[in-house]
Every structure is written in C-alpha cells, then in structure tokens.
Amino acid sequence: MSLLEVSGLTVHFATDDGPVEAVHGLDLSVGAGEILGLVGESGSGKSVTGFSILRLIRPPGRIVRGSVRLDGRDLLTLPEEEMRRIRGARIALVPQSPRTALNPVITIGTQIARLFELHGDLSRRAAWNRGIEALDQVGVPDAARRMGQYAHQLSGGTCQRVMIAMALASSPQLLIADEPTTGLDVSIAARILGLLRELGTRTGAAIILITHDLGVVAETCHRVAVMHAGQLVETGTVRALFRQPLHPYTRALVRSIPRIDREVALEPIPGAVPSLLHASPGCRYMARCPHALEVCRKNKPSLDVVEADHRVACHALEANRAAVA
Amino acid sequence: MTDAATALPLPAQRRGPLAAMWRRLRRNPVTLGALGVIVVLTVVAVLAPVVAPFDPEATDPAIALSAPTWQNLLGTDVYGRDQLSRLIHAARLDLIIPFASTAAALVIGALIGALSGYRGGWVDQVIMRMVEAVLAFPAFVLAMGLTAALGNSIGNIILTLAITQVPIYIRLIRGEMLRVREMEYAEAARTVGNPSWRIVVVHLLPNCIPPLIVQATLAMGFALLTMAALSFLGLGIRPPDAEWGEMTAEGASHMVTGEWWLFVFPGLVIMATVLAFNLIGDGLRDLLDPRMRGVR
Amino acid sequence: MALALYVLRRLMSVIPTLFGVTLISFFLTYMLPGNPAQVKAGPLATPEYLAEVERQMGLDQPMWVQYGRYVGGLFRGDLGESAATGRPVLQDFTQRLPATLELTLASLILAILIGVPLGVLSAVHRDTAIDHVGRIVGVAGVAMPTFWTGLLFIYVLFYLIGIAPAPLGRLASGLTPPTAITGLYVVDSLLTGNWRTLWSSLGQLALPAATLAFSVMAPVARMVRATMLEILQSDYITAAWAAGLPRRRVIYGDALRNALIPVVTTLGVVFGFLMAGNAVVETVFAWPGIGNYAVTALMTKDSGPIQSFVLFVAVMYVIVNLIVDLLYAVVDPRTRLS
C-alpha cells in the first residue's frame, strides 16, 4: 500500500448554471520518497486535486465522492480538527505564488517560527532559532536578517525558498508543490526544483509536483499523471510515458515541450479545455482528438493498464501505438 | 491557488447581457421587492389626492391626537389631521426633492467630470482642487451651511442637496473617463476624425452610465436622509408644507405625553424609503459592475 | 526616508484643500441673508451711520480684500461674534467642544467595538443566517434617520421602560461637573474618583453615543466584511490553512490584521459622518456641544456661529483625514519600508 491513495475523487463547483465537475473519478497513488508529477493545462483540475488532498476546497467547491487515504486512513471522513492537525504536520503545501502566499504584514521570522512552535512544540526562542536554521538549509542567504523582513522585501526566488522551508518545518510525509516555479526566472526555477528533489531524497517525503510543464516533470519526477478536463488520461513512470506517450493529449503535451537538441516546430494543442458544465457522457478529449472514434462519443474510456505501471484512458489505443511508432 | 477557482471553464454566454441581467435580477427577490416599494410609493405620491383617505389639511378638534384607529389608520395630530393622509401627501416632496437634486447633480457632475477627465491638464487640476475642497466638508454639515446661507425654499433645498452631491459624480465620471479614454474604441473614434466633444458624448459617456446609475440610486437615499434631517432641525421644509422629517420633529414634541405614533410613523416611512433605495443600489451594483460582484 | 517624503507631500496637499475650504466658507458667510452692518448698527440707524459702520467693518471693500481680512481673522482665532451670547464665537466653541469630543469619541469606540466583530462574523459565516442578519442590521442602520433612532431610544428606554436617564445634557440635574482636566466628564470623574458623576455621565452619554454609533457601525461592518472576504480568499490565508494553523489564529490573527489596514482609512469618513450626526444627535439629546450650539444659532438666525461651525468641522475633518493617512502609512509595512 502506498503512502497516499486517492480513489474515485470527484469535486464539483456550484455555479449559477449548475455544478461544474472539476475533478471526476480520479485515482492516484504516491509512495514514500516518490515524486509524482501531476500535469495538465490550467483548468484541468490539477490544483483542485491538490487542494482536495488537503481538504481545502471551499464553497462553491465541494468534494462529492471518493476517498483520500494517508497511511490507510481516509482523510475525507476525519473531523475538521483532526484534519487541521494533519495539515502542515503530515501534508504540507508549497503554494503557487510564493510572494502572495506570505502574509504581507507579518515578518518572515514570525511566520516560520510559529510553525515550529505549533508542529515541533518548541519554545518561542527555540522556534525562532530553528527558523533561521531552516532558512539556511534551503539556501536563503543571510537567514537571521531575513527573519525580520517582510515578503515584499524579498525576491520571488527567496520567497519560494521560504515557503519550502515553512513546508518542511514539520518534516511532513507528503509535500504538495503547486506550480512552485511559476513566475520565477528559469535558472532560479531550476534551482528550486533541484532543492525539492534533494529534500525529497533526504527526508524521504513523497512529493506531488503540480505543473503544466512536462519539461519540469522530465527533470524532476519519478512518475507522471496527466490530467485533462478533470480526469486522468494517462499515468506511468516518467521513462515509460516519455518513451511511449499513448494518449493523444500526452503526445500533444510532449510535442509542445521546447527542446534545444532537436529542431522541431512546436505544436500547439488544438482547442481549449472543454466546458465541464454540461460534460458529455463520452470522452472529454474527443473534440480535440485527431483519432476520435464513434465509441468515444458515447462511452468514457477507462484507465486501462497497457504495461506495468503505465495506464491510459483511450479507446483508440491501436491508432496511438501506430502514431508513437 | 486562485487558479483553482478562477480558471474553471466559464459557462458559455448563451443569452445576451440584458437577458442575463434580468435573469440575475429575477433571482434577487430583495432588489425586486425594493424596486416594488419605490414604484408603489411613486404611484401613491402621484395619485395622493385620490389615494389619501382624507384631506391632509382638514382639521377636526374632536379627534385631535387620536391613536391609530380603523378610521385614522396612523392616528391624528394635534389639530386632528389624519396622519396617513399627511404622510401620503408629503411623499410628493419627499420623492421629488431627492430626485430633482440627484438628477441635477448627475447632469452637472457628469458634464464637469467628463470635461475634467477628457481635457486633463490645468482644467482638470483646477476642477479637482475644487472638488476636494467641497468634499472636505462632511456633506450634511455643508448642507447646513448652505441652507443657512441660501434660505430654505424648496428650490434652494434642491440646490443645496445637488451641490453636496456633485463632487461625487465629477470624481466618478472623471475616473471612468480616464480609464475609458485610453481604450481602443476611443482611439478608433479619434482616428476616424470625430470631434472631441462628440467622442465624449456619443462614445465615452454611455460607457460610464452603469456606475452612475448605481451611485445615483444610493444618492437618492442619502439625499432623502439629508433633507429629512435638515427639516427635522428646522432648516429644510417648514410647516405648513408637510415633509416626513419635519413631521417627525412635530411628533417628537408629543413623545413625552405618549403620542408615539406621531414620531414613529414618519421616521418609519423615511427608513423604508431609504432602505429601498439602498437595496436597489446594492442590487444594481451587483448586476452592473462585475468587479463588485460577490463582494457586496 | 520614503516615509518622510510621503509625510511631507501629504502635509503639503492639505494647503490647497484648506484654501478651498476657507474660500467656500467665506462665500457662505458672504451670501448670508441680511446685512451684518445693519445688525450691528441697529434697526434705527441713519443711512450715514450705517455707511460708517459698513466702512468700519470693511464691507465696502472689494471681495478679495474682504476674503483676505476673513482669513487673517481666522489666523488670529477670530471667528466673529455670536449675536445671541454676545461673546466671541471661539470662546463659545472652546467651552462646548469637550462635550462634542466626548460624544464623538464614545460613539467612535462603540462603532468599532460592534462594527468590526460584526463584519468579521459576517465574512467568516458568509451566506449563512449570521451573515444575513448582520447585513440586514447593517443596511437598516444606514437607512435609519439618526434623529429617529435617537427618538426611538428615548421613547423605549426612557419613556416606556425608564432605565435611561432623561435625555437632557451631560449630567443628571443637581450634580456639578467634575474638575475640568480633559473636559470629558467620564474621564475627569474617573481621574478625580468621583463615582457618582462618573455613573451619571456614563448614563447620559449612553443613548446619544449609541445613536451616533448605530449610524456609522454599518459602514464599518460592511467595510470589514468586504475586506475580510477578499483576504480570506487570498493566497496567504490559504497557505495559513494549509499549514494547519488553528482557525482562530488564521481568522483573528492573520486575516483580521490585514483587514484592519483598509479599515483605518475609512475612519476618516466615519469621523465625517459622526461630525455631521453630531448636530442632529446633540439637538435630540440636548447635549451642550458645538453641533447643538450651531443649530440653536440657526434657529435664531445668528449667522456667525453657523458658518464658524461649518468651517470648524471641515478643518477638523481635513486634519483627521490627514492623521488617518499618516497612520495608514505607518501601520502598513509595505508603505513603511519600501
């Protein structure tokens, strides 16, 4: 059994025109020490999935079905107070935009130190010192001085390092990093990712890396899960998935990675994420799919095993294999 | 994070914006109800002589200071005049004065604001300094000073209320104008060779109308409150003209002898009317200004 | 350094505003019905004597000269004379100012103490019964004419139930005011340990302060609610939830601390409302402050005090807004340090 097992997760957002199914019947598992890349366009439901694991979906959003098991215990049925003790302590979040994720009117030091007080049961002074250490560890220079500063005085990269230090304050078992490199300079982004990978190895924490960038996944992750319109379309090891991307959407994503070593025209994926308001009973990728079959209109493809640890949800598998070959 | 909520695919607009607005309005019974209150009140005011059960001036010492009865639903005053009839007739002044002052302020403010925002430069500077000076006075205090200086004829009260409101519209329109001026359709109109006044009147002002309507509706309530308070203090409408604030003042002098209905009902009518205006204003803001939607 | 520059700029910006304010109040005085020289000379004055008085008062000078004299007078603290009391308006003002100050401060404190928690509750329990009730109270509070709220309070609490004292001034009759230290009866009787006057002045203050507070509590609550809603959806609050911070700490620590900053800016506007409400509330409760003084002057066509009141309130308002802005700059680390 893996550390985290998500099964059948379904999340709805109420709108004026009826519920929008942001995540539909999602299955996912992450083992200790593993880095899973959760990939998809914006609106594909990957962030919603991340927040569902933390049970931080707020109205009009609502988790309708499914279970999220951490070490076998279903988080979705826990009382709120118990869930709160898990947040930050056992599952931590590295948020999307580090600059806005730090409280603008509280010093960095106070924000870090209070986490050590809360999760590590330390005295105020000890927590403060641990905070300085933690900043040091994630490579924030001049940590002691930074403690007295505010978010707006730090660079984006430093803010993200601070966020990672905060996420690690309680040595969590699972780290959810939601687009942790958005808005960061390429070289800084690479260093942040390196830091995450290193921390994963050192602490043995599992990491879910939410991103829209397959390039990032290729460099950082062990396994990948590709989401489209609220559903998983393909999962597998990074190696398998990049060697043989079987779902047409994954293929399109792979082709849209800019590469230095090859001279290929980047191909945009046609169409946009379809409306999830009046989702059809069939495959949600159909409208954008080059291989769409008649069966795709009526039946949702299930996520089927094609080889060890490689699963795809697509009716047109043969056409896909041909396309890859 | 915000990505989760905002990046959700939005439902396609299947109907026009007006239809969508009506759909939202229909689902907003509070705004509709408030609108109903104002419509009924206006009709009652217009038809006052027909609707009022009695002549508001008719005195009858025999029933002076009578508590509410089936005959006189809201009781009678010290001269035996029917309070309900007086309130109904007073509705005319209480609606027309805020309306006239708001309309005047709206037109004047829109023109000055448009000029200020469109021309910019020293014209804008001078106008904005003047606006700031007027806004430096709490509105009601300025109104007190103005009525004292101008005298309290109905025309002067309208003028007073208009003056206290004008700066708000000037600012509003100027801001919108600065925002809209840079937009593409203004640019397009200019390149086609439209004279500048035409651009302002035909192309820019209509885009400023939604926030104006919201502001004007809220201002109606405020103007009514200001007028009532002026009259209550004896600075606004004076007897024998009936006005709700002035009626409350008259009623207040009977409180110590227990004739509560004389001050309770006029005040209640003021509150209900202002409440209705405010609710409509809030509802319209939600409908017209998507930026404010949900913030309320 | 940036802060010092900001303070300087903000201080400078007051000058044109004050110029405009004095200009307007000068025009208000200038437009006043009646000839002040006639008033001074008496109804039986000969035309020659009247012209003499006009010359003495400078009324024959061009308008801008008169404005110069007016402003010059203001700098010397000359607000004119009250025909009713026969004393300089400034003297009457300083005597009545503590009463107004006490009432204004009490209602400001009350409005914040009630308005802020109400706004927080509404935002936290958005779209629940608590929120709806809070909003109804808020909307009704804005719509109620202040004088009427005051009358209702008096009618119910004094006339019907009898738990409130008679709405006549700052102390029950028969009591002498405490030794003047601040001029605020509550504070002074506290400082001098005079419990009877303290109790009486608190009782007298309760209803007018509640009346005034009721009218401004709603905007405060509304503002707090709107900013809280925005802040509760911000990234840093989500991050705080995700870090497992206790609910209380997130809402009253992290969120409210941020929400109060914009609320500080509305205090200026709230103060304006309170000053405007003063005239009405002081009249209803026979509270001997400057608002009451101005209204009484209006009744007797005593123009000096009225225009001085208008000018005085405007100047106070400008100063309070200045202080609020400076306070804002100091409170918010973003403006303080960048």
Image (cartoon, coloured by chain):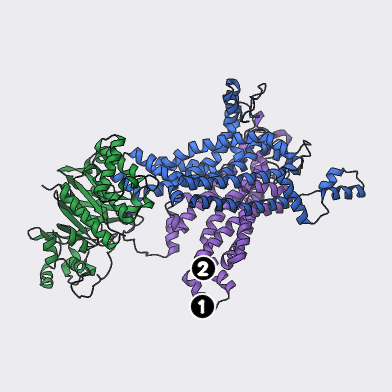
Q: Nearer the viewer, residue A92 or C141?
A: A92
Relative side of A25 to B21, left or right: left
Q: Is mark 2 on a helix, strand or loop?
A: helix
Classed neighbour count for the residue bearing mark 1: other residues with Cα under 10 Å, few (<14), some (14–19), many (≥20)? few
Quadrant of the rendered image containing residue C203: top right
Q: Earlier in the sequence, mark 1 or mark 2?
A: 2
Seen at 59% across and 62% down, the residue is B113
- From the rendered image, report the letter of the chain displayed in purple: B
Relative side of C281 to C251, left or right: right
What colour denotes chain C?
A: blue
Say which chain tag 1 marks: B
Extreme residue toward the front, this view: A142
Q: Is mark 1 on a helix, strand or loop?
A: helix
Q: Which of C279 and B100 is in front in this view?
A: C279
Seen at 58% across and 52% down, the residue is B219
> Tag 1: residue type?
Thr
Extreme residue toward the bottom, this view: B192
For the question of whether residue B280 can be seen, the reply is no
The percent position of residue C287, horizontal first and vertical second, equals: 65, 33
Tell me the residue that label 2 is attached to.
B181
- From the rendered image, report the letter of the chain displayed in green: A
